[in-house]
Image (cartoon, rainbow, N blue to C red):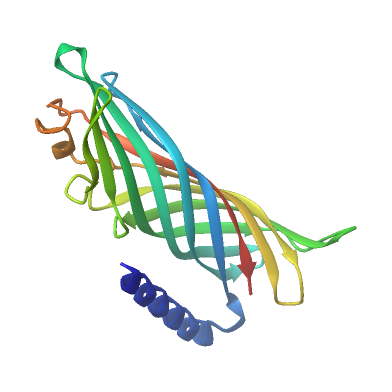
Amino acid sequence: MKNFLCLLFAFALFGETTFAQLAGDNLRLGFYLSPGASSFRTQNSDISTSGGPSFGFGLIADYRIADNYAIGSGINCSYLKGDVTITGDGGVEREGNYRYGYVEVPVTIKLSTNEVATAIGDFIYFGQLGGFLGVPLLRTRYDFYEGDTQIEDNEKAANQVSPVNLGLTVAGGAEYAMTENTYLYAAIWFNRGFFSVLRNKAFNADRFNYDDKDNKVNSSLLGLRIGAMF
């Protein structure tokens, strides 16, 4: 997995550097780190869900299409956590604790202000709206409990997690001018997935023992992104 991530970022950096040469001054690149919180949610009243801490990092790419307007994209790597609980036969609670990671490509429209002078320096404020496509390529594991007894520990969950996720992205933040071309970057970032992150096979007899076909469990992520733009 470490080798895969190294290759992914090497390819991304090479591709974005090549694209930057072609795009000229219209393309800005950056990077970020992102602590946050993730959650599961469901419309099924028989399933209880909760979330946990998350962490992410990635590359930022903004391509300017007009003054104060840009197409925002990049590569996001996000590690999330979510819990699913179902009360089975005899009132025994069965709980799955999932730790999963996605590689995502967002595509957004980014609206920015001109530089705003303040007492501590110049700021650019921005908002973004769009979507993302994600695949679970990072380490995906789960623990499973029946009541207070742990049945499975740190097991692979690749066959339980859906192979693709698509969702909504909303963000807002600011850039602080350090030099003419270097800006500190901070943003609040929200992702809401449209697809279920767990397949129905995650609810079969050897785990939850629950066969309702309406087992859709969606994920959400709220994070603080801190980084730099160039």
Can you tell which quarter of the image residue 67 is in? bottom right
Question: Looking at the image, which residue sits at the far left?
Answer: 205
Name the quadrant of the N terminus: bottom left
- Front one among 140 and 166: 140
* Relative to 90, residue 147 above or below: below
Question: Looking at the image, which residue sits at the far top?
Answer: 90
Please indicate whether residue 213 sits to the left or right of residue 34 in the image. Answer: left
* Relative to 63, residue 190 above or below: above
Name the quadrant of the C terminus: bottom right
Task: Give the mark count.
Answer: 0
- Front one among 212 and 108: 212
* Residue 132 location (% of width, % of height): 40, 54
Please indicate whether residue 190 sits to the left or right of residue 134 in the image. Answer: right
* Relative to 68, residue 9 above or below: below
Can you tell which quarter of the image residue 12 is in? bottom left
* Residue 16 location (% of width, % of height): 47, 79
Residue drawn at 46 percent across, 47 percent down: 54
Please indicate whether residue 19 sits to the left or right of residue 184 in the image. Answer: left
Please indicate whether residue 120 sits to the left or right of residue 132 in the image. Answer: right
* Residue 115 location (% of width, % of height): 77, 63
Residue drawn at 76 percent across, 77 percent down: 180
Question: Looking at the image, which residue sits at the far front?
Answer: 149
Can you tell which quarter of the image residue 174 is in? bottom right
* Residue 191 location (% of width, % of height): 45, 46
- Front one among 67 and 197: 197
